[in-house]
Image (cartoon, helix red, strand yellow):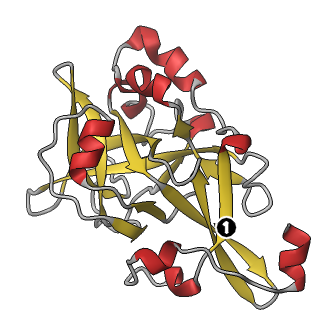
Amino acid sequence: MCNRFRSSRSDRYLAERFQAWDDIEHQPRFNVAPTQPVVTIRQEAGKRKMAMMRWGLIPAGTSGLSAGHFFMNARSETVRTTPSFKNLINRNRCLIPADGFYEWKKMEAIKQPYCFEVGAGDVFAFAGLWDEWKNPSGIVVTSCTILTTAANSLIAAIHDRMPVILPPEKYELWLTPEAKMLDAALAALQPYDANAMRRYPVSRRLNDSRNDDPECSQPIRIESSAQKQLF
């Protein structure tokens, strides 16, 4: 599962990193939460385009429900058969840039958040899906979800699921909406190499999504019996 992540690079940096057309305004974020706008990259007319989308996918066919009905995550193993996603996987694939994500470990009387990074805090991309939903007022809401898979060995001590992180060589494959490439795109939805990642505990300030500053993502030192068992 993934319900918080970090996206602390500027929109200009992300545009260059992903070779995408930049028409957004994005401020560095350290505690991104569901329902908030996030940077996405999708293919449009053969070119990569950056866009801000609401994190928490509202399927186009949703009716009689408010925008509170959403999917922040989608299981990659069943995405081809789940009604809300099976059409999107063919044509509405996107990348969601990040440079860290968080999970919580129950430790004695508290839940301790941990940050997970690729390399030394390098930028990477989650595999995502997007859709457009029209609210009762006729306003179109573009939203997205992050695909998940089984946890790798680094994350398994904290949670049994992890977001799908795509290696750069798979970006073009994931973004290209061609039916003949779907099987290959689905095959790319694998746990990321644990040896290429690191984790560390961070402040419980992260628990409140109103806290969104570099301190949320700084390593901290904790001492407990549970911590000793974890490491």
Residue 38 pos. (x, y %): 31, 57
Q: In this view, does 40 lie to the left or right of 157?
A: left
Look at 52% across and 82% down and name the residue there.
Answer: 207
Seen from the viewer's position, the closer of residues 191 and 89 is: 191
Seen from the viewer's position, the closer of residues 91 and 29 is: 29
Q: In this view, does 135 lie to the left or right of 77?
A: left
- Label 1: few (<14), some (14–19) or many (≥20) C-alpha neighbours in 10 Å: some
Is residue 141 positioned above or below 209 on the image?
A: above
Quadrant of res 114: bottom right
Residue 131 visible to an observer of this rendering: no
Look at 71% across and 48% down and name the residue there.
Answer: 151
Residue 61 pos. (x, y %): 29, 45
Residue 163 visible to an observer of this rendering: yes
Is residue 43 positioned above or below 25 on the image?
A: above
SS under mark 1? strand
Which residue, as the protein is rendered here, is positioned at the far left? 138
Residue 105 pos. (x, y %): 72, 73
Seen from the viewer's position, the closer of residues 168 and 179 is: 168
Which residue, as the protein is rendered here, is positioned at the far front? 120
Q: In this view, does 57 lie to the left or right of 149?
A: left
